Image: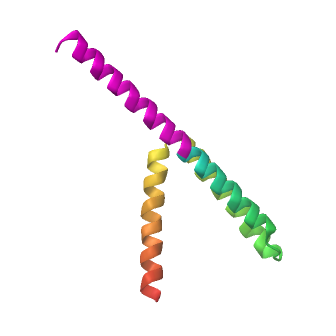
Amino acid sequence: MTDNTAQQAQHLAEDAADKATDLAEQARHAIDDTVSTVKSAVNDLDLDKTADTVIATAHETLDKITAAYKRNPALVLTIASVALAIVGTIVSRRR
């Protein structure tokens, strides 16, 4: 490989890494926004004491999902995709 080709390959790899970082950051913001929206929606629910436990559990779960996403976004997105596919299958079978 010539120096020029090696340099071009390095630039290409750096550009790909930068784009991947940008996409991961965009996904992180989308997850954070979604979690915030869900938390707000849950807080707006007017339910009894039993629901307070559900709401607290939902907050705890969302916090854990956010923390897990920040540690390993690809894993969380993969698990979420599988979970959505399973839920979609269950819902479609009920119809």
Q: Main secondary structure of the magenta part?
A: helix
Residue drawn at the location 24% of the way across and 13% of the way down: 4
Q: Quadrant of residue 54?
A: bottom right
- List x then y, in percent, for residue 50: 78, 75
Q: Quadrant of residue 14?
A: top left
Q: Is residue 54 left or right of residue 27?
A: right
Q: Residue furthest left?
A: 1
Residue 45 colored in magenta in the image? no
- Extent of the magenta region: 1-26
- List x then y, in percent, for residue 25: 55, 40
Quadrant the N terminus occupies: top left
- List x then y, in percent, for residue 49: 82, 74
Residue drawn at the location 35% of the way across and 21% of the way down: 11
Residue 9 colored in magenta in the image? yes
Residue drawn at the location 46% of the way across and 65% of the way down: 83
Q: Is residue 31 left or right of residue 16?
A: right
State whether residue 74 appears in this view. yes
Residue drawn at the location 53% of the way across and 47% of the way down: 27
In the image, is residue 81 above or below residue 54? above
Q: Residue furthest top?
A: 3
Q: Is residue 4 left or right of residue 42?
A: left
In the image, is residue 62 above or below residue 29? below
State whether residue 59 appears in this view. no
Q: Is residue 10 left or right of residue 95?
A: left
- List x then y, in percent, for residue 94: 46, 87
In the image, is residue 90 above or below residue 69? below
Choose between 12 and 75: the one closer to the eye.
12
Q: Residue furthest bottom?
A: 95
